[in-house]
Image (cartoon, rainbow, N blue to C red):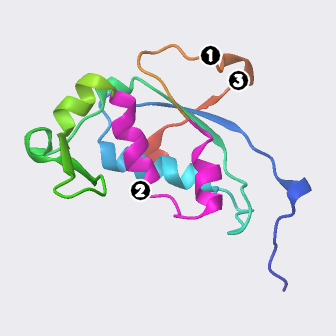
Amino acid sequence: MKTYMAKAGDVQNGWCHVDANDVVLGRLATKVARILMGKHKPSYTPHMDDGDFVVITNCEKIKLTGKKMDSKFYRHYTGYLSGLRERSIKTVMDNDPTEVILLAVKRMMPKTRLGRQQLKKLKLYTGTDHPHKAQDPQEIDLSLI
């Protein structure tokens, strides 16, 4: 039996809608990363971008477990001496709640050109409205994935 490998003409990218209201951040990020990479499809091919577009609404209503709201920090180094910069997750959520989900999903994607291409299919919005209603995204229940 031969292994099926998808070709560029065979790829069908669908649209999915996820409501992030009261969903734990890590569980949301893992399941969205699977959908973006296409691992939920039987035609998954590692070197092809056959994942679906994902629209996430209500990003400001995600849930963090434990004491993460007080103790979790995002750190990056600027490259200069003593250039370590820290931001708490509370300040990031106050400024732009979509950035928290974007960073969580981005860190679960492959660190390659293909992973960056797949991450561009993630659309994040605060509130319940989004401009992708014309694509007719199907509602995804994260408990089933």
Asked if 134 appears above or below 50 in the picture, the reply is above
Residue 90: give x, y in percent of width and height. 17, 32
- Numbered mark located on residue 131 in the image: 1
CA gap, disc 1 to disc 2? 26 Å
- Answer with the quarter of the image where residue 140 lies: top right
CA gap, disc 1 to disc 3? 11 Å
Whether 106 is among the magenta residues is yes
Instruction: Provide the secondary structure element on which disc 1 rests.
Output: loop
Which region is colored magenta?
97-122
Q: Nearer the viewer, mark 3 or mark 2?
A: 2
- Numbered mark located on residue 116 in the image: none
Residue 85: give x, y in percent of width and height. 20, 47
Residue 51: give x, y in percent of width and height. 67, 51
Q: Nearer the viewer, mark 1 or mark 3?
A: 1
Task: Name the residue at 17% across, 44% down.
Answer: 65
According to the image, label 2 marks what residue?
A: 107
Instruction: Provide the secondary structure element on which disc 2 rests.
Output: loop
Mark 1 or 2 closer to N-term? 2
Circle 2 Cα neighbour tier, 10 Å, few/some/many (<14 / 14–19 / ≥20): few
Asked whether residue 83 is in view, the answer is yes
Q: Amino acid at mark 3?
A: Asp
Instruction: Provide the secondary structure element on which disc 3 rests.
Output: loop
Task: Name the residue at 64% across, 55% down.
Answer: 38
Task: Name the residue at 50% across, 58% down.
Answer: 109
